[in-house]
Image (tube, helix red, strand yellow):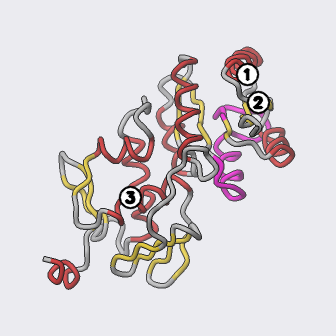
Amino acid sequence: MAEPPLILVVDDEESYRDALSVALQREGFLVEVAADGQEAIDRFEATRPALVLLDVMLPRISGVDVCRELRSRSRVPIIMVTARNAEIDAVVGLEVGADDYVSKPFRLRELIARVRAALRRSPNGEQAEIPEYDVLEVGDVRLDAGRHEVFVRGELTALPLKEFELLELLLANAGRVLTRDVLIDRIWGPNYFGDTKTLDVHIKRVRAKIEEDPSNPSRIVTIRGVGYRFERPRAAAAASA
């Protein structure tokens, strides 16, 4: 029988740590806790959790810096926990590699749903989908699903998990418009409760890595009021027409 997933809860407020620990354990998860940024990094290295719940406001090392450090070492799902209405914290957290965010005070049931959805989407998740292809290649962008690698104009380009999944979905549907709802449902899951700015931030981050001019994107184009489309090169598009 497989061991339950281990969740690392990082928060300097004891009341939140305790409440989250009890709720997660009640749902069958194992739990480790840390009270500051440095302890979070140390506990992460010692326990290698399946997911990290990470508060933004932490002593010693900020949650954003912890997120950046963890993301440089691992693709483990990270859910940032921000103060109420601290939208800038959430956006910065997403920019440095967080997968999702939730604002305090949060509903425990909602948070548990997000944890389960993030674990399902993780490469190590029990219900993670296995692609039916090994390589997707559109123009000068090549994605190797089996090796979890992306090459842009022949150069290996590092993408965190959510960015990789988003690019993979767009490439698999190159030439087709994918609505915002479809993208959010496929990447963040049907139980996602956040706003659509999360999608926009991730699109911006992917564009920064694959577009020659991210301010004037030619690969991932916005279809105003609908969603996004990955453009096929004109010659390829004409040949498939």
Label 3, on which residue? 169
Distance in Å between CA atoms under marks 2 and 1: 6 Å
Residue drawn at (47%, 33%) of the image: 87
SS for callout 2: strand
Give the residue type that dot 3 points to.
Answer: Leu
Query: Mark 1 or mark 2, which is nearer the start of the sequence?
Result: 1
The label on residue 72 is: none
Q: In which quarter of the image is the N terminus?
A: top right
For the residues labelled 1 and 3, say whether their Cβ atoms are less than 8 Å apart. no
Give neighbour class at mark 2: few <14, some 14-19, many 20+ (Cα, 10 Å): some
Distance in Å between CA atoms under marks 2 and 3: 32 Å
Q: Is residue 136 magenta?
A: no
Image quadrant where residue 142 sits: bottom left
In the depicted view, which residue is nearer to us: 87 or 45?
Answer: 45
Relative image position of residue 197 (x, y in whole percent): 38, 41
Distance in Å between CA atoms under marks 1 and 3: 34 Å
Label 2, on which residue? 30
Give neighbour class at mark 1: few <14, some 14-19, many 20+ (Cα, 10 Å): some
Give the residue type that dot 2 points to.
Answer: Leu
Label 1, on which residue? 25
Drawn side of residue 238 relative to residue 100, left or right: left
Relative image position of residue 5 (x, y in whole percent): 71, 37
Residue drawn at (41%, 61%) of the image: 167
Relative image position of residue 37 (x, y in whole percent): 77, 39
Query: Mark 3 or mark 1, which is nearer the start of the sequence?
Result: 1
For the residues labelled 2 and 1, say whether their Cβ atoms are less than 8 Å apart. yes
Q: What stretch is highlighted in magenta?
A: 53-76
Drawn side of residue 37 relative to residue 222, left or right: right
Q: Does 16 sit above or below residue 130?
A: above
